[in-house]
């Protein structure tokens, strides 16, 4: 059977890290015993792929890998990080910290009985579940860790600082080249009289 006109096909190769199984999905009260609810983010990625929610599966992979990589490498001391209780959004695939409320606090940070969400990506509040990050061989829960998002002003300031640093490096390299050229004696003429 041919695809309908205007259909774009894309081949998907989504590698799902086995460490995703360390991030457990917490069932809501009305989902307890639901055999269709994935147990962990590895199962969640498989479900999103089977449901042909490719963008959601890719987003789930990206946000989860980012968190796992921070744990694997350890904080670098330079990057601002946020810690807290995370959720997974079934609408967009985002796994991460919920969007903060008007008071700047996130649901679940202080009140463990609070409902999950809203999604930190799409703001969905209904189709989300809390996550429990565990470590291999350890049932203790660890917080979700993510790079802090910069405000528009902070991002612009960082960009200006990076440009200024690149400019200073170029100026220093040009000055060093001029000094090296000035210190080199002129080549002797090879003309004979």
Image (tube, rainbow, N blue to C red):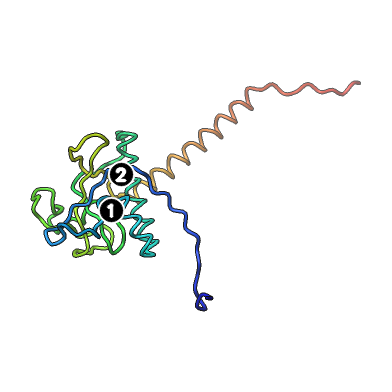
- Measured as percent of width and height from the top left, residue 175 is found at 55, 32
Could you say whether the residue bearing mark 1 is in a helix, strand or loop? strand
Residue drawn at (34%, 48%) of the image: 157
Task: Give the residue furthest to the right.
Answer: 193
Q: Are marks 2 and 1 in contact (CB under 8 Å)?
A: yes
In the image, residue 111 lies at what x, y percent? 8, 50
The circle on residue 82 is: none
Image height of 154 relative to 124, above or below: above
Tell whether 86 sits left or right of 58: left
Could you tell me how many numbered marks the image carries?
2
Viewer-side residue, 63 vs 140? 140
Neighbours of disc 2 within 10 Å: few (<14), some (14-19), many (20+): some
Residue at numbered disc 1: 95
Estimate how packed mark 1 is, as few (under 14), some (14 to 19) or many (20 or more) residues with alpha carbons within 10 Å.
many
Name the side, left or right, on which 136 lies relative to 52.
left
Using the image as rendered, state which of residue 39 and residue 73 is in the foreground.
Answer: 39
Indicate the position of residue 163 as horizontal and vertical percent values: 44, 45
2 or 1: tag closer to the N-terminus = 2
Q: Based on the displayed image, in which of its 4 quarters is residue 122 positioned?
A: bottom left
Q: Which residue is mark 2?
A: 67
Q: How far apart are the alpha carbons under marks 2 and 1?
A: 9 Å
Identify the image quadrant of the C terminus. Answer: top right
């Amino acid at each position: 059977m041919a695809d309908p006109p205007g259909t774009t096909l894309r081949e998907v190769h989504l590698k799902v890290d086995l460490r995703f199984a360390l991030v457990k999905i917490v069932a809501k009260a009305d989902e307890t015993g639901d055999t269709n609810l994935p147990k962990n983010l590895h199962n969640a990625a498989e479900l999103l792929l089977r449901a042909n929610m490719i963008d959601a599966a890719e987003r789930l992979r990206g946000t989860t890998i980012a968190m796992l990589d921070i744990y694997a490498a350890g904080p670098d001391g330079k990057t601002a990080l946020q810690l807290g209780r995370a959720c997974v959004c079934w609408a967009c695939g985002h796994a991460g910290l919920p969007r903060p409320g008007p008071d700047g606090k996130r649901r679940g940070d202080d009140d463990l009985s609070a409902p999950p969400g809203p999604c930190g990506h799409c703001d969905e509040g209904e189709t989300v579940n809390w996550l429990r990050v565990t470590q291999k061989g350890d049932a203790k829960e660890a917080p979700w860790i993510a790079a802090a998002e910069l405000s528009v002003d902070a991002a612009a300031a960082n960009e200006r600082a990076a440009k200024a640093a690149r400019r200073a490096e170029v100026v220093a390299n040009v000055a060093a080249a001029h000094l090296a050229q000035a210190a080199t004696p002129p080549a002797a003429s090879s003309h004979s009289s």
